[in-house]
Image: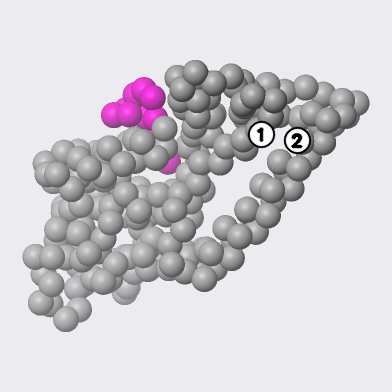
């Protein structure tokens, strides 16, 4: 990584995704986290250098050259371009700032890349492209339990079965004569988009129902 923006993006993603090991070699949809950061960083830098061009269109070979200067594998460069190219399944130009036009050329959406937050863009793309992040939830649960125990409090995670019903507890905390059920959800922050806010609200209601179910499981 060559500057503070790239380094801070790596630190943020490492903490947000609760990555414990192999952060430099771990695979995220065929690319390492470093390669994702470099890809966005190089595209953003190219846009800033050409900010006065009213329309930014480049050939495929030019686009590959921009990325291949720091991402050594041309196969990975092409995979990165594929992820960022707008298609019928794309959510918006924030996640997919490249539009393939006639003659193997690409229109680069400048507003999406000129003032980009690299870590937010990567997390959003992971979500849109359904790129799996192994053990993110499990590592977050471990982190919560560990920090509560360090405070000198009793807590644990466990599961049990009653008939056909399975009950899984991320963290159960005891303070005095009270039992607290913590349902750990590692979700990325909601951007100020109405559809994201609505979806988060639906998720929250489902999480509340889940905790109520876990409560009944303990009481019964």
As drawn, 104 above or below 138: below
Q: Quadrant of the N terminus?
A: top left
Instruction: Report whether 27 appears left or right of 160.
Output: left
Instruction: Report whether 101 appears left or right of 29.
Output: left
Instruction: Report whether 21 appears left or right of 55.
Output: right
Q: In the image, what residue occupies the spot 10% across and 77% down? A: 52
Q: Nearer the viewer, residue 106 or 195?
A: 195
Q: Quadrant of residue 84?
A: bottom left
Q: Which residues are magenta?
A: 19-29
Secondary element at tag 2: helix
Question: Can you identify the residue that label 2 sits on?
Answer: 214
Question: Can you identify the residue that label 1 sits on?
Answer: 181
Which numbered disc, 2 or 1, marks the residue that appears first in the sequence? Answer: 1
| Neighbourhood count class around disc 1 (C-alpha, 10 Å): few under 14, some 14–19, many 20 upward | some
Answer yes or no: do the residues labelled 2 and 1 have beta carbons within 8 Å?
A: yes
Q: Position of residue 61 (x, y in %)?
A: 20, 57
Instruction: Report whether 46 appears left or right of 121.
Output: left
Q: Nearer the viewer, residue 170 or 46?
A: 170
Q: In the image, what residue occupies the spot 66% across and 47% down? A: 207
Q: Nearer the viewer, residue 3 or 61?
A: 3
Res 178 visible: yes
Q: Quadrant of the C terminus?
A: top right
Q: In the image, what residue occupies the spot 26% across and 60% down? A: 116
As drawn, 217 above or below 40: above
List the single residue furthest toward the bottom. Answer: 54
């Amino acid at each position: 990584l060559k500057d503070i923006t790239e380094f801070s993006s790596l630190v943020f993603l490492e903490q947000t995704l609760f990555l414990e090991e192999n952060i430099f070699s771990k695979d995220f949809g065929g690319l390492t986290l470093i390669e994702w950061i470099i890809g966005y960083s190089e595209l953003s830098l190219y846009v800033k250098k050409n900010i006065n061009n009213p329309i930014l269109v480049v050939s495929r070979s030019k686009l590959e050259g921009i990325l291949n200067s720091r991402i050594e594998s041309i196969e990975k460069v092409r995979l990165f371009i594929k992820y960022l190219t707008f298609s019928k399944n794309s959510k918006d130009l924030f996640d997919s700032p490249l539009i393939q036009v006639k003659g193997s050329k690409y229109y680069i959406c400048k507003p999406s890349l000129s003032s980009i937050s690299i870590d937010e863009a990567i997390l959003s793309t992971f979500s849109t492209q359904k790129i799996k992040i192994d053990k993110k939830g499990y590592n977050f649960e471990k982190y919560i339990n560990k920090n509560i125990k360090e405070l000198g409090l009793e807590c644990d995670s466990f599961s049990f079965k009653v008939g056909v019903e399975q009950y899984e507890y991320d963290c159960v905390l005891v303070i005095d004569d009270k039992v607290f059920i913590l349902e750990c959800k590692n979700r990325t922050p909601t951007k100020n988009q109405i559809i994201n806010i609505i979806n988060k609200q639906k998720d929250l209601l489902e999480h509340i129902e889940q905790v109520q179910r876990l409560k009944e499981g303990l009481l019964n």
